[in-house]
Image (cartoon, coloured by chain):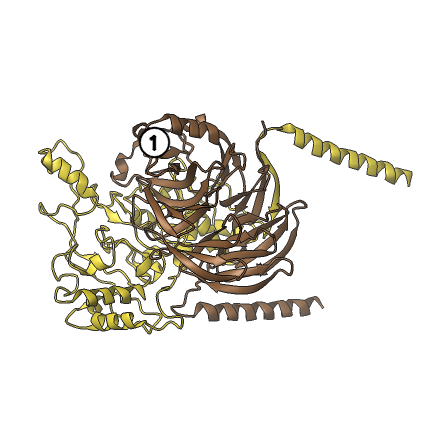
Amino acid sequence: MKKKAWLFGLLGAGLISLVLAQSSNAGFIQGTRVRTDLPSPFHVSVSPDGGTLFICNQSGHSVTFVDAKSHKITGEVAVEVQPEASVCTLDGRTLFVCNAESDNVSVIDIASKSVKKTIKVGDWPCSIKLSKDGSKAYVTCSGSMWDTVDIIDTSKQEKVGEIKTSHYGPRDIAISPDGKTAAVCLDTTGSINRGVDFIDLATGKLIEHRVIPQSANLRGISYTPDGAFVLVTMEQPKNWLPVCEAENAQIFSNNLAVLETKMGGKVASMPLDEHNNYDGNPYGIAVAPDGKYVYIGIRSMHRVTILDLPKLLDIFVSSTQEELDDLKNDLTLMVDYLVKRVNVGLGPSSVALSPDGKICYAANYFSNNVSVISAPSD
Amino acid sequence: MKKILTMGLIAALSLVGVYASTDLAGAGEAKVIATIQTGPEWEPLGRGEPLTVPEVHYRVKHSPYKSELVRYGQFQFNEASWTLQGEYSCASCHYERGQTTGLIWDLGDEGWGSWKNTKYIRGGRYLPPFRHEGFTGHPDEIVGATSSIDRVCGRDPGFVFRSENFSPERLEALIAYIRSLEFTGSPFRNEDGSLTSAQERGWKVFADEKVGCIECHPGDPANPRALFSDAQTHDVGTGRVGKDGFRTTPGAVFNTAALAAGVDPYGEEYDVPIIGLDLVKEFDTPTLRDIYASGTYFHDGSAQTLMTTIDNSCTTKDMHGVTSHLSDNQLQDLVEFMKAL
């Protein structure tokens, strides 16, 4: 009996690998797979009632459903190639999943755990957020030569339009608390001064493009709950000097960009690094609903860094733009607003908060798990 | 029966005790309170492990397969603790997808003062050599070699990539991952993979012998295996050698200022050259596959867009293809064609 099971297993594996080989031979059509057998959770999102976690498995090409209370896996749904983000509708019934390499969005019926539809979007969709009323989903298409945020009608479940960004590579999008504006971070290949587009959602028109000087690898963006600031995780490459002349060996430094949302407002790159303790590759970001804490997944140092947002903003507000420009390499500054660095699994790429902000979830790419972190309490 | 009940009670109480004690231990402090395992457990070797353990990658948990070597390499590619203070990983320049940030760096690999473009490393295994000058990375050298990566990413010993601390096995894993990265394929073709009409027109210009693109970038767009590179080095009018060679790239900002201030670029008071010069004028012909994703272009990143690679604005006239007689529309078609590769 055991032998038979093995035989069936082997046959099954053979068939699956044949199918995979077929699709990877598709020539110029996108769909190259990452060659690993492991699921690699890349993104975590939470249902509006906080009851379910949706985990996008970037190399497993699936979404895992987890019960947030019991921490038990309740299902897994296969999607297309390389899912990198998901969002649940406000009624909790539907999940939209961005399949980055397939250039489409899977629509999953949560009750039956099945894919109902696939919507074609632009190149490399890697983030998706809902409008405030939940009627639309905005998909950032971050391809190296792509410049759209595609709009999906969540009830019709089809693409109804697109917003042109000012440069290539829209990587992540945040919707302002009043629902009127979107902030899109543009990770434009080749640019040393990447930035943020502020977009009027009613018209889809660009209000302002704000440059974050000397920035690269903009990966996550979030509004503060009062809508006055936008926060962006970024790296600062010091490539204008030969690397042997970089001060404090700062070939790169890792920062959190803070942008005032008012027109022409201040921009700062607040350090996440301390001497001999750098936050290599900051990725996902989440802001507590009460505005007290910011959570950042530090992918290459395997921890979640928690910042005290009011203290951080105090420094920002009380400094002039000139002073802020000097702060971005100050390795002594971080202690002023650091709450804690929490070691998690390997490669935390995305963080998400429970609706009450008391629990932070981090999707750990390499260790194939999700860390559940209790929020600091006063 | 009584015994069982008592034991159960003790067990239950002790469990409550454990739960209560962990809960109270750090009240108020953020901490990991649970870990939800959603896939197989996976751990690389700890840093305390000896660096020269033979077959180190086979000791990774659950690793009976060769693909585990790739996975371990991917982990190292995204691991910052090997850099000086944990400030960056390979993925900081080459992205987590093996692409490129498109920024130029002076890594000192041929003397300080020579900024080089970050290479797009998807599909890189098909086309050694790996450096812009074509010095490094003979196929024999890249496989299992301990030295090729630190020579690619900086001078030896590497300023950027500290591979002198790596065991040969760790390097092998890293190389296995880099070699596993495939081209992504263009999103700009028709749904069925055929060329659009603009791309067809561009292909005709590309294949025109008078224009000469295809001479160094041979390939057929209908062939998914075509690489569009002759794997040779050529002088296409981008090398900046000699006193006239002041750069057009961000390095130039410093050079011009120094020049304006009356500094002799070859003066002895500077122990590093302050002008960006290339040692050679000939550079490795890059593949055109995924060229839409691999900007900026040329060895020094001087071409920000595909158009500027062919419109003579960044090169000596008609050295990078004979294009000065082409109309704007033809140049645009050529760009559309390149985007389809």
- Residue placed under numbered mark 1 in the picture: A329
| Residue B272 percent coordinates (x, y) | 18, 37
- The residue located at (39%, 48%) in the rendering is A199
Q: Which of the chains bears the disc numbered 1?
A: A
Residue under the point 24% across and 54% down: B132
Seen from this angle, which residue lies furthest right?
Answer: B1
Q: Residue at x 14, y 71 (%)?
A: B210
User: Is residue B341 something one can see in this rendering?
Assistant: no
Give the residue type at disc 1: Asn
Q: Position of residue A96 (x, y in %)?
A: 53, 57
Placement of the N terminus of chain A among the 4 image quadrants: bottom right
Where is residue B1, by image quadrant? top right
Q: Please, what secondary structure does the residue beneath circle 1 have? A: loop
Query: In this picture, is B218 found above or below A268?
Result: below
Q: Quadrant of residue B215?
A: bottom left
Query: Which of these two is toward me, B64 or A107?
Result: A107
| Above or below, B341 relative to A216 | below
Q: Residue at x 41, y 30 (%)?
A: A274
| Left or right of B109 on screen, residue A121 | right
Residue A352: image location, x then y, percent? 54, 44
Chain yellow in the figure, letter: B
Give the color of chain A as drawn. brown
- x%, y% of residue A344? 54, 40
Say whether residue A26 is visible: yes
Closer to us: A60 or B145: A60
Drawn side of residue A314 relative to residue B314, left or right: right
Along the line of sight, the residue nearer the viewer: A85 or B270: A85
In which quadrant of the rendered image does the C terminus of chain A lie?
A: top right
Q: Quick check: A51 left or right of B326?
A: right
